[in-house]
Image: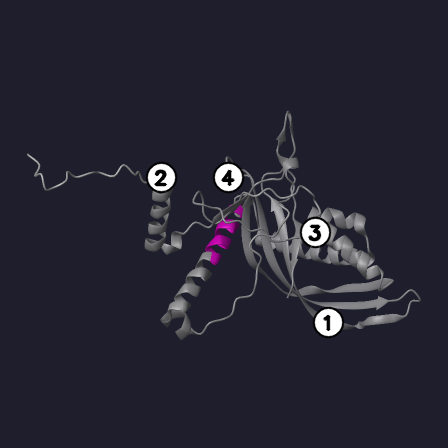
Amino acid sequence: MPVSPNKKPLQFSKTLVKPSFMAKALVQCRRRILPFLAPSRVWLEQQWEPSPWLLKSETKSPHISCVRLMSTQVKPPAQTRQMGSLKVSMTSPGFVYDQYSARESLSFWYRWFTRSGWKRTKEDVVLELKSAYAIAKLRKSGYSKKKFYEEAVDLYKEINTQMANGDKGLLRKSVTENMYSALKNEIKHRETVWSNVYWELIMPIVKMRTLRARLIGVDRNDLNKVFVQLTLEFLSKQKFEAYDSNGAVVAGDKNKEVLVRDIWVFEKSLFHQGAYWRLCGRIKV
C-alpha cells in the first residue's frame, strides 16, 4: 500500500520494558487483587557484625521475597558460613524477630464497619496465621504445649534465681549469647546498688499463655534449617527483698507476695541435634 507523501510512516519505539519493572508491576497487581497473600517472608540481606554481644534486638530490611509465607530468612554472620573444609553451625540468630506489642482493642462497629477497622482486622488475621504456621511447623518436630509450658516455667524460675544469686556460670547455659551479655551487665549494675537479693517464686503460676510464634530461616536452599521463637506471658506471685553491704533491707519485703507480669521470648533450633529451649529476649510491659 503506497504511503501518502503528507503522512509520515509509523515509527515503532525501540525502547524495551525492563524485566524488573514488569515483575514489580505484576507483584503490585497481585497485591491489589489478593491483599491477604502479600509476601510476609523477610530476607535480611545486610551483613551485621559477627560479634556475639549485640545489644540491639530489632533488625529490619527493605528487601522482600515472595518465596515463602510466615517465616523469616536471616543471612548468617561471617563466622557461621563455610570456611574451607570447616563448617561452623549458627547457634542463634541474635535478635527477637517481630517483637510482640499489645494491640489496642476495637469495638465491634469500628472493626467491621470502617475502612481502618477492616485494615486492622486484616493485620490481625495475618499475625495469627504467622503464629499458626510456626506452631504447625514446630509440632512436626514433636512439640507438646503442656511439656513446653512445664519446661518454660522451670526456665523462668531457674533464670530468675540465677539472676538473684549472681550465678553467671549457670546462667550462660539457659540463655542465648546476646541475652547473656545483657543479663551479665544487668547483674553487674545491680551489684553496685544492692549487695544481696532474696527472690522466691510462689507456685503454681497464676496465668501463662502464648502470645506469638515465629520462624527464622538461615538457609535459602534448605527450608528445614529454621529457628523458632515463642513469646510467652507469665503472671505469677513473687517475693523479693534486697540488702545492702551491711545486711540491712533497702528494698522489698520477703513476707509479702507481689503479682508480677513478665513477657519472655524463648528460642530453639529445629535443625540441631540435642537443641533445647533458651531465653533470647524479654519484652518490657
Q: Which residue is mark 4?
A: 223
Marks 4 and 1 close (CB-CB < 8 Å): no
Q: Which residue is mark 3?
A: 179
Mark 3 vs mark 2: which is more N-terminal?
2
Residue reaching furthest to the left = 1
Residue under the point 48% across and 57% down: 127
Residue 10, image x, y percentages: 16, 39
Q: Residues within 10 Å of mark 3 (few under 14, many from 20)?
A: many
Q: Which residue is mark 2?
A: 19
Residue 86, image x, y percentages: 66, 27
In this picture, which residue range is highlighted in magenta?
A: 127-138
Residue 136 part of the magenta-drawn span: yes
Q: Which element type, helix, strand or loop, lies under badge 4?
A: loop
Mark 3 vs mark 4: which is more N-terminal?
3
Could you say which is closer to the camera, residue 36 or residue 189? 189
In this rendering, which labeled residue sits more in front, label 3 or label 2? 2
Q: CA distance from mark 3 to mark 2?
A: 44 Å
Q: CA distance from mark 4 to mark 2?
A: 27 Å
Residue 26 falls left or right of residue 79? left
With respect to residue 243, does 210 lie above or below?
above
Residue 39, image x, y percentages: 43, 49
Residue 116, image x, y percentages: 41, 68
Q: Is residue 276 visible?
A: yes
Q: Amino acid at mark 3?
A: Met
In this rendering, which labeled residue sits more in front, label 4 or label 2? 2
In this rendering, which labeled residue sits more in front, label 3 or label 4? 3
Mark 4 vs mark 2: which is more N-terminal?
2
Residue under the point 61% across and 59% down: 232
Q: Residues within 10 Å of mark 2 (few under 14, many from 20)?
A: few
Q: CA distance from mark 3 to mark 4?
A: 26 Å
